C-alpha cells in the first residue's frame, strides 16, 4: 500500500485539555491534540503538544506525532495506536478538564489516545461520562 499524503490545505480539529497536576512552579500543564483530517473526514495526521514542559518532552511528543501520522498514512488503523498507548503511566497525570467525557489520565499520552479513541473510533468504553446513544457523534 502506498502512503496516502494529505493535501497541503486540509480541515483539522484541535482539543485543549488542562491536566491538574502542578509542576514545581505550581503550573498545570496544557495538552493540545490536533488531528488533520483526510477529505473523507477520517484522521490522517496527529500532532500532540504538551505546554509548560522542557525541550526533551516536546521533542519526544513531536517524534511520536510524526510517527503516528506516517503510520496512519501508510494504513495503520487509529484503533491500533489507541490500544497501544492507553494506560501508559508517567507524569503529569491526574484530574483533567476541557472535555466532558474524560475526568482523569495516567499520562498525557493516555489522555490524548483516550480522546482519540472516543472521538474517532467510537470507543465509548474509554469515557467516564457516556452520553445517551442518540447524542453520540
Image: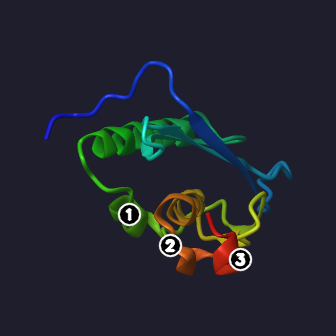
Q: Local crowd at mark 2 within 10 Å, few (<14), some, or many (≥20)?
A: some
Q: CA distance from mark 1 to mark 3?
A: 21 Å
Are dots 2 and 1 in contact, CB under 8 Å?
yes
| Image coordinates for residue 18, horizontal then vertical, percent | 77, 54
Task: Compare marks 1 and 3 and give the one earlier in the sequence.
Answer: 1
Q: Which mark is residue 44?
A: none
Mark 1 or 3, which is nearer the eye?
A: 3
Q: Quadrant of residue 77?
A: bottom left
| Image coordinates for residue 121, horizontal then vertical, percent | 46, 64
Residue visible at 56% across and 76% down in the picture: 124
Q: Secondary structure at mark 3?
A: loop
Q: Which residue is mark 2?
A: 123
Q: Which mark is residue 131?
A: 3
Of 3 and 137, nearer the camera is: 137
Task: Compare marks 2 and 1 and give the one earlier in the sequence.
Answer: 1
116 to 10, vertically: above or below: below
Q: Which residue is mark 1?
A: 79
Q: Quadrant of residue 102?
A: bottom right
Residue visible at 40% across and 23% down in the picture: 7
Amino acid at each position: 500500500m502506498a502512503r496516502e499524503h494529505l493535501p497541503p490545505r486540509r480541515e483539522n480539529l484541535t482539543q485543549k485539555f488542562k491536566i491538574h497536576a502542578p509542576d514545581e512552579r505550581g503550573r498545570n500543564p496544557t495538552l493540545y491534540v490536533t488531528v488533520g483530517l483526510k477529505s473523507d473526514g477520517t484522521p490522517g495526521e496527529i500532532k500532540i503538544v504538551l505546554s509548560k514542559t522542557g525541550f526533551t518532552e516536546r521533542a519526544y511528543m513531536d517524534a511520536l506525532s510524526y510517527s503516528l501520522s506516517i503510520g496512519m498514512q501508510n494504513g495503520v488503523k487509529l484503533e491500533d495506536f489507541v490500544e497501544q498507548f492507553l494506560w501508559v503511566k508517567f507524569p503529569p497525570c491526574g484530574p483533567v478538564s476541557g472535555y466532558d467525557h474524560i475526568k482523569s489520565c495516567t499520562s498525557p499520552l493516555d489522555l490524548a489516545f483516550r480522546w482519540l479513541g472516543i472521538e474517532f473510533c467510537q470507543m465509548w468504553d474509554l469515557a467516564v461520562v457516556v452520553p445517551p446513544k442518540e447524542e453520540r457523534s
